[in-house]
Every structure is written in C-alpha cells, then in structure tokens.
Image: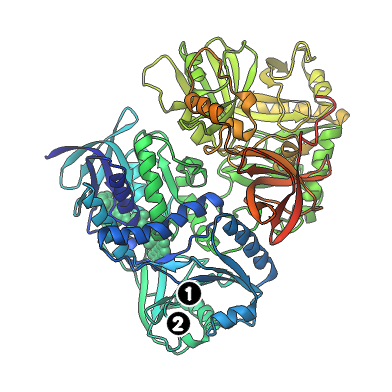
Amino acid sequence: MSVEHRQIVVIGGGAVGLSVAYHLGRLGQRDVLLLERDRLTSGSSWHAAGIVGPLRSSINLTSLAKYALELFVELEQETGQATGYCRTGGIWLAQNAERMTELRRIKAMGDRSGLDTQVLDPAAIGERLPFLHCDDLAGGLWVEQDGQVNPVDLCMAYARGARARGVEVREHSRVERIETRQQSVSAVLLADGGRIECERLVLCAGAWSRDLAATAGVDLALAACEHIYLVTDAVAGLPVPCPVIRDLDAGIYLKGDQGKLVLGAFEANPRAWRPRPDDDGFLMFDEDWQHVEPMLEAAIRRAPLIAGQGIAHFMNGPESFTPDTRQLMGEAPGCRNLFVAAGFNSIGIMSSAGVGKVMAEWVRDGEAPMDLWEVDLRRMDPLQADDAYLAARLPEAVHNQFAMHWPYKQYQSGRGLRRSVWHDRLARHGAVFGAPSGWERPLWFAADAAEAAPDYSYGAQPWWPAARRESLHCRDHVSLFELSPFGKFEVSGSGALGFLQQRCCGDVDIETGRALYSLMLNRRGGIEAEVTVTRLAAERFLVVGGAAARFKDFAWLRRTLAAGGDVDVRDVTEDYAVVGVMGPQARALLQELCESDLGDSACPHSSARSIVIDGRELLALRLSFVGEPGWELYLRQQDALPVFDRLLDVGVKYELGFAGHYALDACRLEAGYRHWGHDIGPGDTPEEAGLGFAVRLDKPCDFDGKAALLEERRRGPRRRLRLCEVDAGAVLILHDEPVYRGDEIVGHCTSGGQGYRSGKTLCFVLFYRGEIIDGFEIEVAGERFALRVLDRPPYRSRMQ
Ligand SMILES: Cc1cc2nc3c(=O)[nH]c(=O)nc-3n(C[C@H](O)[C@H](O)[C@H](O)COP(=O)(O)OP(=O)(O)OC[C@H]3O[C@@H](n4cnc5c(N)ncnc54)[C@H](O)[C@@H]3O)c2cc1C
C-alpha cells in the first residue's frame, strides 16, 4: 500500500473542486492535490446548461456570484483556455402582480450590489425578445449581467490554472474513506489501496459528498435527483447570443446554444436518485418524455416558435439539492480540518468562481473571509441529513428554486423534526407553527380558524393582527414565549473560566448566579456568536445562544478545545425546556408559585437563581429580549410539563397569555435588540453593530479578535448599524432594501418590521460610513419612503 503526505487534499474534479484547487494555488498554498475518481467534469459539471446569473437572493450571495464575471474573463487570459463565457443579458418574467413585486424587491437589492437591472412592461419585453409570447405577462426584470459559460471549458481552464500554480490534479483516483483522528481529518484512503495523509481536506464531490462525509462521521443534508434539460434543433429567428429567459411562474428557463434553444425546469415532481461510490462517470439517465411534457408545453406557450421543432438532445443528469436550496460550505462540525463545498442546487457552475475563492481563504485561515452564514453548513440540523426527511423535502426544495419566494414562507414538507415537550399544549392554545430552524415553534397564536391559515403576501401580513395582540398583551399583562430551541451549552472544568475568557469579548469572570450578554469574535473582530453566559458555579457555566446558530455556536466554542484538557464543553440543548415569562405581571405570577424572593434586590436584572415550583427545581434567569420585565425558566425535561401546567393554572389570575415568534421579533426590534444572522454577523464588529458596551478591552487577559478591535479603535469603525423609523405606514420591510441619500446608496436594511407597542414601522440599517446624517430614504419594491435614524429604541417598559 502506498502512503503519501499532502498539506491539502481536494476531493472532486468538478467545477467547484477545480475552482477551490485553482484558488488555493492562487493563494500560494503549497503541496495541494486534487483527486478525481473518474475524469475531470464527469460528475454533474459536464452536462450543466452553463447559465451565469449573478443576481441572487441576498447581498452577500450576489457579491459572491458577481466575482464570476471578472474571473471567467481573467481565467481565459491567464490560461489561454477559452471558457465560452459571454454576457447575453437575461429576463426574469412575472405572470402576476405579486411576482412583479418580488422582482421589484430583488431589483432594489441588485442595484445595491451594482448590477444593471431594469423593470420592463410586457410591451418592452416583446420589443426586446419578439419571439416571446407576452400577452399573459405582468412584466419582467432585465439583468444586463446575465450570461453563459461552457462548463467543461471552464473546468479545463481551472485545471490548467491550478496546475500552472503547482497544484497536482490526479484523475482515476477514487477516495473510499476519510480517516479521522481525535475529531480531525488525518488521511484519505483510496479505492486502489493507497493512503494519503493530509492536514486539511476539502470535500467537493458533488452528489457523492454525503456518503463520503459519513465515513468521517459528518452528516450532510443533501439529496440528489435527476435534473433535465432539452436542446432543440436550430431555431430560425433566434438571436445569437440569446438572452437567458426565466419564466418563474411556469418553473422553466430557456437559453440559447448556438442557434438552438435549451429548455430546463424546476419541477414539483423531480425523480430522486441515490448516488453510489462506483457510479460510472458521465452518467445520463433515461429519457422520460412523459415527465418533461408539462415543461415542454410551458416552453412552447412562452416561445411559440419552438412548436414543431425537433429535439436534438435530451439531457438527464445528476444534481444535488439541499433542504433550503442553498449550498453547504465551511468546516464540518465535529471534524476539524474537513471543509465542505457541496449541494449546489443547480447553480454550481456559476457559483464555482466565488465559492472557490472564499473556500480557499477559509481553508488557509480556518475562518470564513466574509459573512457566509446563509450557506454555512453548520446552519443545518444533523437530523436534516436523515433519508426520510430528505426524501420528503427534495421535491419542495427543487420546486422552490422558481416558486414564489414569499416573505415568511414556511416549508410544508419534512416538518416535525424537533418539538418541545409542551408542543401539544401550545397547539391546543392556537399556535400556528413554523420551523425556522429545525424546531417547530409557534409563530403566532390564532384567535380563530381564519387566522390560522397562513396566506402569503408581499403586503400587510395576515398574522400582523395576532402579533400585535400578543405584543400588547405582553406589555399590559404577562405572556409565555416558547424558548426551548435556544442552543444551550455547558462549559465546565478547572479551565472553564480561562477558556471562556479567551472566547468571549466581555469579562465573564462574573459572580456565581450572574449572567452576562457577550459576543464571540473572529480574528477580524467580526461577531461569530451572540450568547448569554451564566455562571452556575465557580467552574461551571451555561452558555446560551440563538436556535438557528446552535450547531455553529457549538462548533465555534469547541474549535480550539484540546482532547483530554481541563475544559469540557457539552451541548445540553435537549436536556432543558425553556419558557419565557415576560410582562409586568411576570414577577407576581412567579412569586405566587415559588418561595424564593424575586424582588429587585434579591433577584436583579441579569441574575440567575435556582427556584422551586411544586417541588421541582429550575433555573430562573432574569433576562428579557422583548423590552418587558421577565424571566427565562430552564426546566429539566421531566419537570417541564407539570410546571408549565401550574403556570397556566395560576396564570389565569394574571391574564397569562401566549406570544409567538413573530411577536417576539417585533418586540425585540422595538427594544433595539440586534438579531445575530440578520443585523449582525461575522462581517460586523461590535463597534459597528452598536454593541461596543459588550467589549472589555481592559479585561486582564487576551480574547479572540482583540487585536482587530484595537486596530479599529485607532481608525474608527467603517460602518454603523442604527435603528430607524420608516415614514410609511404599514409597509413590509424585510431585509437588504437599499437606503439612499439623494441618488447615492448609503446603506441597506438588515431587518425590519412593525413595532406594535410604539406604533412604528422600524428597521435596522447598516450605514456604510461612520458618520450618520439625515435625509435618508429606503426603497421598498420600487417605492421610496423617508427614513429617520432614532437616537434610542422607541419602546422601553416603564417597569424595567
Ligand atoms: C441538467 C442540469 C443543468 C444545469 N444547469 C446549470 C446552469 O445552467 N448553471 C449552473 O451554474 N449550474 C447548472 N447545473 C448544476 C451544476 O452542474 C452543478 O451544480 C455543478 O456541476 C456542481 O459542481 P460540483 O463540482 O459541486 O460537482 P460535480 O461536478 O458533480 O463534481 C464532483 C466530482 O467529484 C467526483 N467524485 C465523486 N466521488 C468521488 C470520490 N469518492 N473520489 C474522488 N472523486 C469523487 C465526481 O466524479 C465528480 O467529478 C446544472 C445541472 C444539471 C444536472
């Protein structure tokens, strides 16, 4: 058996793996080896349609995708290998007014990202593309930078560029297994018996990534299916090059190919496919003409000149999709130095440029070079890698590519992954559930059947009346909030304090029984996690973070933990159910249930006390995220239901109500609390985020990100996040809406919503310069509204 050693091994010779290898070479990384089991491109890349569409669903993803426009040109010049890249322009069609609103919103985000876009009415579309049937259209969005590339040529250019920079690209070398030692990658074992030890491994094996990751004990939530396009014979009258046409409401796209038309679809009934390690290269599945009939009919309706054309080629090949239609990138939780870039949901060719660049930097530095949370694989719950779950979710995920991207949309399939112990109780009280982060959580509590039916819209949300009712109830009385999905970690051992001092930028050397809001920073001073640290004993801490970031927070906490050291970090999320008891009557209610003194002096804000209700001991943390006085109660699972029921019984006297996730979000916005993942993230420093109070530069020890914060202090923050009020009545503000001063875009919204207690429409805005003046406007779906920066949050309870 041959044994080799490499610094970095990349698995997979498709567009993504080759781009990663090329960019590692560009970064000057030495001793890089790419392994491909068959020939380069033989997985999904060889048969891609090659559409390049830089306008994505968010500012960060658009900036990542836009890099392709530069790189494809540069790569050709550098390597002498043509890539077939050309800019064709493209149109996104809308068949109804709601879709048009969606496109207007996307356009605003595109403007912010520097793309040239134009809203067109049906007549203007007909003038530009006379072969399209436009009578049934509401309009469309023209994107000047849409284009296409030849996927195989692009891959060859990456390979040539990588080799020229010293990367070894080896074909016919199948990795059979990934070997780990002490939860870190140590080697790959090849099917021919070879063994290659490596320091870092990048898994870019497309649809085959899931099974390979499993050999290292890593769960990857991706599923493969057959993905199809048809190529017509040459069509007379077609412009060359032909713009990309996406008929979103029909679920189809059209693009030109040297005088022919390529027709593809994101159908609601894709055919699932299970990859196997010994699959042939260049796989092509059966021609199922019945399956493509609806797509063909839709294409003929849109471009009648196709009718009667012969089909020159039926392409049916493998592609992988993920539960939320975004790729999986980053270091695998639970296995250090194993990096993943897979699950590209039919945009892997166009994404390969930006993905290759940031992945190479991620592998080199051990930290993502920008905020990549939306595609970070640690956003996935390991339960989402389950076969049955993926089978249920796959059709909806594929169809969702072009389906309406409604605000607050919830997936229908693959639900019920995680439920709290009092789920049924909440359901009986009218909870309308959603699963924003794996867990079923009440979004709101419906007063009747009509309120329970989620009816999506880009205008006033049907749940606004419920969220308003719940917010006001919490202001006036007391309400229960379901908080069980919080990520909860116990850090213990003689080294626990020193370990947390290094991780957190606040001084966590607090008294036992105290809690501290703190941040964990990366090397650039960016906020990787937002947590509450509670000291339970001298050498025992409870660290609590948001539900969505649970697996990322845990991985971030543990990333430098040495095995067998003096610190133990455990995920105890499932051990506790948590309920928030919030509102002016919270103290009276809890005081009636327990004998401990919950008064201000015995139990001040940010204190943690063990209290007993009905003989059951629980942890009561005096904290509130909603701007009302309140407690978070942490209960052992076996104690949770009896205590919950007691709360409900005694609560009648205090008019105890329920509040859902949407009321919680509205209340936190009004109280000026930032939301990690939306308002703040790895690209924002505490100072930029307005969270400078959480940093203790003077604490008697070093902490992650300190050097970057000192540097920032010298030069001042580059940007500023501020809470703003919008003069717009009840307009729906989501995220990424651009903010103007005159004609200049000076910032963008990070989250927004209604503040029911203050009666204001609010949003957080990230301003790109340190200095904040006035005269701002926010653009929402093509309309501008005056925006005022607030000096302080518009709501604070009189009782706090
Ligand atoms: C019909 C169709 C149309 C598409 N159209 C577009 C489009 O217009 N635009 C776009 O951007 N994308 C498009 N895509 C998607 C695109 O093809 C994929 O997203 C992209 O190719 C994924 O690239 P990858 O490198 O991640 O995976 P792959 O190309 O599958 O590469 C993975 C490689 O890993 C190798 N491998 C697997 N297992 C092992 C192992 N054990 N050891 C070593 N090597 C291994 C495989 O052989 C393969 O070569 C389309 C896909 C299909 C099917």
Q: Is residue 431 visible?
A: no
Nearer to me, 706 or 367: 706
Q: Quadrant of the N terminus?
A: top left
In the shown orientation, is residue 518 left or right of residue 203?
Answer: right
**Label ID, residue 486:** none
**Label ID, residue 243:** 1
Q: Quadrant of the C terminus?
A: top right
Which amino acid, by three-letter code, is at mark 2?
A: Pro
- Asked if residue 783 is positioned above or below residue 314 in the image, the reply reads above
- Asked if residue 708 is positioned above or below residue 767 in the image, the reply reads above
**Residue name at image x 38 percent, y 45 percent:** 359
In the shown orientation, is residue 179 left or right of residue 615?
Answer: left
Mark 2 nearby-residue class (10 Å; few <14, some 14–19, many ≥20)? some
Q: Is residue 51 visible?
A: yes
Which x, y percent locates residue 285? Answer: 34, 69
| Rendered-image quarter of ligand 1 | bottom left
Pointers 2 and 1 in contact (CB under 8 A)? yes
**Residue name at image x 36 percent, y 17 percent:** 564
Which x, y percent locates residue 239? Answer: 45, 82
Q: Find the distance from the CA under tag 2 to the CA under tag 1.
A: 8 Å
- Asked if residue 339 is positioned above or below residue 254 in the image, the reply reads above
Which x, y percent locates residue 457? Answer: 71, 59
Which x, y percent locates residue 770? Answer: 62, 38
Q: Quadrant of residue 217?
A: top left
Nearer to me, 224 or 65: 65
**Residue underneath mark 2:** 239
Nearer to me, 416 or 673: 673
**Residue name at image x 64 percent, y 59 percent:** 105
- Tell me how many marks there are: 2
Report helix, strand or loop for mark 1. Answer: loop
